[in-house]
Amino acid sequence: MFKIYFIALLFIIPSMAFGQAKLDRMLQERESMHREWKASESKKTGIFGNRTKKDMIETNEWMQRIIQKDNQIMEELRLMSEIEKTEITYEKNDYKFISQKQEREIALLKRALEEKDLQVVEKKSGQRIFEWTTFIFVLSTLGLGYLYWKKVRS
């Protein structure tokens, strides 16, 4: 999973940088178109300094070009947004994979700890049995020794 994420980053980061450069270039083109539109808006080639039909058609053509450029910019922004969403999805999946792996490791550690606790309990119970048998053996030896001593003395 980490390899997939790393490979995806190798392709996404350059494309993001390329997309940003393309967006900057498109914005500069739109800005120059806007200046051209302003210039065509102020043109008055008609009689007595009035605007002609040709002047108005040129202004409308510049406005159409600006609208087309705006649509291209919007499409580029949408594409960059999709790339960012994809990158976030990869990161989310990577973190999800890591957390699942850690949860599995924690479960394994808990199981190992429980097994060790059971071994300790079994070992202690084995020691208890040995202690009790030793205690009973000592008491019976003392009791038998006392009885033997009483028998020999009498």
Image (cartoon, helix red, strand yellow):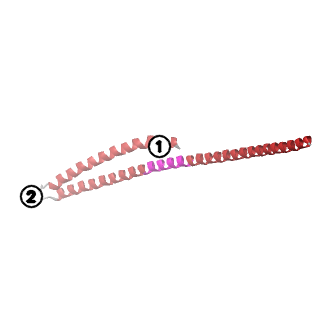
Q: Amino acid at mark 2?
A: Ile
Residue 103 part of the magenta segment: no
Q: Position of residue 19 (x, y in %)?
A: 36, 45
Q: Which disc, if any, is residue 47?
A: 2
Give the label, 2 or 1, closer to the camera. 1
Residue at image position (65%, 48%) is 114
Q: Callout 1: helix, strand or loop?
A: helix
* Real-space Cα separation, disc 2 to disc 1, in angstroms: 63 Å
Residue at image position (33%, 43%) is 21
Q: Left or right of 11: which side holds 66?
A: left
Which residue in the protein does label 1 denote?
Answer: 8
Q: Position of residue 85 (x, y in %)?
A: 43, 51
Q: Which disc, if any, is residue 56?
A: none
Chain-order first, disc 2 or disc 1 = 1
State the count of labels.
Answer: 2
Residue at image position (86%, 41%) is 145
